[in-house]
Every structure is written in C-alpha cells, then in structure tokens.
Image (cartoon, grey):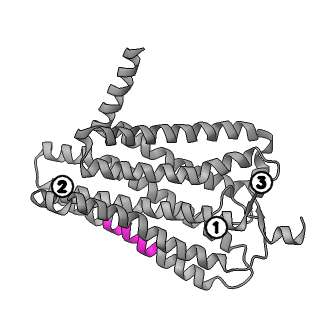
Amino acid sequence: MAEGFNETYLTLPGHAGFNKLRYLFFFTFLTVYIFISFTDSLIVFLICSQRSLHKPMYVFIAALLLNSLAGSTAIYPKLLSDFLSKCPIVSRSACLCQGFFIYSLAGSGYMLLSVMAFDRYVSICEPLRYATLVSPSAVAALLLLAWLLPASLVAGAALLAGRLRLCRFRLDRLYCDIYSFLKLSCGSTLVNNVYGLLCNAMIVFLSIAFVLFSYSRILLVCLRQSGSFRGKAMRTCLPHLLVFINYSVCTVFELVHNRLQADVDVAVPGVMSVLIAIITTLFNPVVYGLKTQEISKRVKNLLCYHRTER
C-alpha cells in the first residue's frame, strides 16, 4: 500500500484465516445477528405493548436488551461485510468510532445490571420504600446515568487515542476496540492506559462490587424468610444473576486475553473476540425470554396466537 494510504486505513488480517470458509462464517454470523435482532426486538415490543409489564423491572430488562441490540449492530454489519471482502480495511476514524460504541455500550450494560440489582434489592429488602425509591422519575434518571456516564468516559478515551500517531497498521482483531488501537501507536500510551484503568474502575469494578453487595444483602434477607418467599425471590433474581455472571466472565476473559496476548496466529485473537461478542449478545434474549416467567408467557401467547390465525 502507498504511504499516504497506510496513514489513513488499518488492515484486518484476522479475516485471512477464514478465507476458505468465509461464506459459511458469513451465513453463521448473519443467522446469529438476525436471531439477536428478532428476539431482542420481540421482547422489547412485548414490554412496551403490554400494560402489565410497565414496571421498573421490565423497563430495565427492555433497556438492557436495547443496549445489547445496539452493541450487536456496532459489530455484526461491519463483520459481515468484511467476510465478503478480499482485503478487509477500516479507516482510522471509523475504527475509533466502532471502538467507542463497543466500549460505551459494554459499560452501559454493566451499569444497567447495577441498576437492576438496585431494583431487586429495594424490592426484596425495602419493599415499603419501593414506590418512592424506584419511581418513574428515578427510573428515567437511572437509565440516563447508565447510558451517558459510560459514553462520556469512553469518549474521553477515544479522543486521547485519536491524538496518537500510528506506526503499525495491522489490527489483529475482527473488529476495532480502543485498547487494540492503542497497541498500534508509536509513542507512550501511559496516559491512555491510566485513564482506561480509571474508567474500568468507575464502571466495571464498581458495578461488580455493587451487584455483589446487593445480592449479599438479598441473600441475608431471604435466609430469614419462608421457603415460598425465597422461591419467589430466586425466580426474579436468577435471570439477572445469570446475565451478570456471563457479562463478568466474558469481560474478565477479554481484559486478560487482550493484555496478555502472545504471538499466535492472527486468527486466534480474532476468533476469541468474536466468540465473546456472540456469547454476551446472544445470552441476554435467551435468558430473559426463557427464565422470566411473565415474558416467557407473553412470548408463548403471541406465537400461539399467530399459529392459530394461520
């Protein structure tokens, strides 16, 4: 490539390992994206259209699924087009833009899980104060905080990364993220790394600590109550716990894998990054569609109604 071209565009060599089976991977990821889009949209539609689901818990579930759908859209369309390209490339600005959306939405996912833990904590541990603490205005404020705080913090990381001069132009991933972009730079990235650690501490680690604290208090309350109370609490908390564990395991694996990445075949980090993206985005609609009793019942009723109409 010409020197001027290299200054503007990055190559994605991780796709080279998929050339022989690229159409198979294309249709596989297309199917996954269609499934995620359909199931997320269906559950969000049911929550919005059914008055009985207009409760804070279901509003937070809809927000989390919308967040998941937006994250999938930030990854899959570009990924699918790259599978059909012989030489996948991405401009510097588009790479940073994709990294911003992926990191911002990932952070929002954690904050939404924290908000949902707060909702469950108040519902189980402070039921008499639930209407006051989780009012419609409080729900709106929590949702705005969950989306705007990560977006503002990640925007700062993207702006800091955008000021760096690049010496390498091979991004060993199947999509862009800000940390991988930093590894292509020439100069010191100390400021970027410190800022990134602070952002992780504010969003990821504080969210994990808050969820663990909330569920420890919920567990203590449940141990003092009857078996029926514990069963009802478990049914409402289990989907959230499953999604939280999935998010945490995938996030820790991604952070460790990205920072301790050894000199391996370029397809390996690409495959790992996509598997993590698939697991995190695919898990949410499956869990909330099957494990949340009210939503599962509404989905079955809707599907049975359409079958009867035919």
- Near mark 2 (Cα within 10 A), the count class, few <14, some 14-19 or many ≥20, is some
Residue 112: give x, y in percent of width and height: 37, 59
- Identified by mark 1, the residue type is Leu
Determine if the magenta segment contains residue 91: no
Near-viewer residue (173 or 260):
173
- Near mark 1 (Cα within 10 A), the count class, few <14, some 14-19 or many ≥20, is many
Q: Determine whether, in the image, residue 7 is placed left or right of residue 98.
A: right
Determine if the magenta segment contains residue 202: yes
Alpha-carbon span between mark 2 and mark 3: 49 Å
In the rendered structure, find residue 123 and report the number of the disc placed on it: 2
Q: Main secondary structure of the magenta part?
A: helix
| Mark 2 vs 3, N-terminal side | 3
- Identified by mark 2, the residue type is Ser
- Residue 38, placed above or below residue 284: above
Which marked residue is nearer to the observer: mark 2 or mark 1? 1
- Residue occupying image coordinates x 58% and y 79%: 193
